[in-house]
Amino acid sequence: MLWAIHLFGWISGIDLGQLGVYPRRADGLIGLLAAPLIHGSFDHLISNSLPLFFLLAGLGYFYRRERWTVIAIAFFAPSLWVWVAGRSSYHIGASGMVYALAFFVFFSGVFRRDRQAIALALAVALLYGSMVWGIFPIQPGVSWESHLFGALAGVILAYYLRGHRPPKQPYSWEEESDEDGLEDVLAPWNYKGRYLPPEGFRHPD
């Protein structure tokens, strides 16, 4: 969808940037829906597409129950907070969503402390650890507010959903227990190894 929208704007020559979030203006509210889908250049689009693909894949595999909640909040929350407190300029791009997902995945590993979450958190830290510098107003022309509010949304989501642990998948040898059959075989024997005859059994005189 991101690529289709950008190609449409590039081929048609229409400036889609005006559909971005413009803080504290009524016409800027359309950016709550449109801003994460619009990018200023192919470099901007590529820089967001690759981490977005990886993070959504990891989210769908490791956090299936809460993935739609996380995706919805990661999509809307950064843009909404930018509209409230951002600079007076158009803010576009899916970077706020990328930061929300990355920080959710990383801090979920910190808060949950299970092996799968920690492994995914370490992978995100290795691949995108340098993203943390994007939350500071260092690079001109970059919406660091989207990055900051996206990261904040991810941390809040990770903390709020920290108790939602995936159900433990039983191993194949755990699915069908042989305990019942073993008990039937050993039923005539007590804990001292002595034979116990069935109830109603009478030893012949």
Image (cartoon, rainbow, N blue to C red):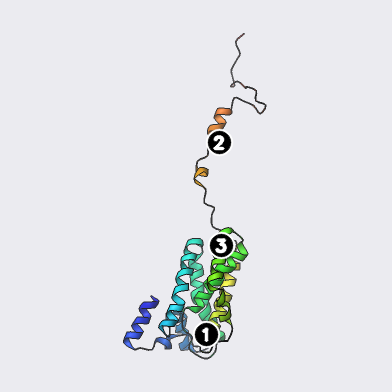
Q: Give the camera-side residue of 156 and 191.
A: 191
Residue 122 quadrant = bottom right
Residue lying farthest to the front in this orientation: 126
> Mark 2: which amino acid?
Glu
Which of discs 3 and 1 lies nearer the camera? The answer is: 3
Which of discs 3 and 2 lies nearer the camera? The answer is: 3
Upstream in sequence: badge 3 or badge 1: 3
Q: Mark 2 Cα within 10 Å, few/some/many (few <14, many 20+)?
A: few
Disc sitting over residue 119 in the figure: 3
- In the picture, the quarter occupied by the N terminus is bottom left
- In the picture, the quarter occupied by the C terminus is top right
Rounded to the nearest angstrom, the CA distance separating label 3 from label 1 is 30 Å
Upstream in sequence: badge 3 or badge 2: 3
Q: Which residue is mark 1?
A: 143
Q: Which residue is mark 2?
A: 179
Q: Give the camera-side residue of 9 and 51.
A: 51
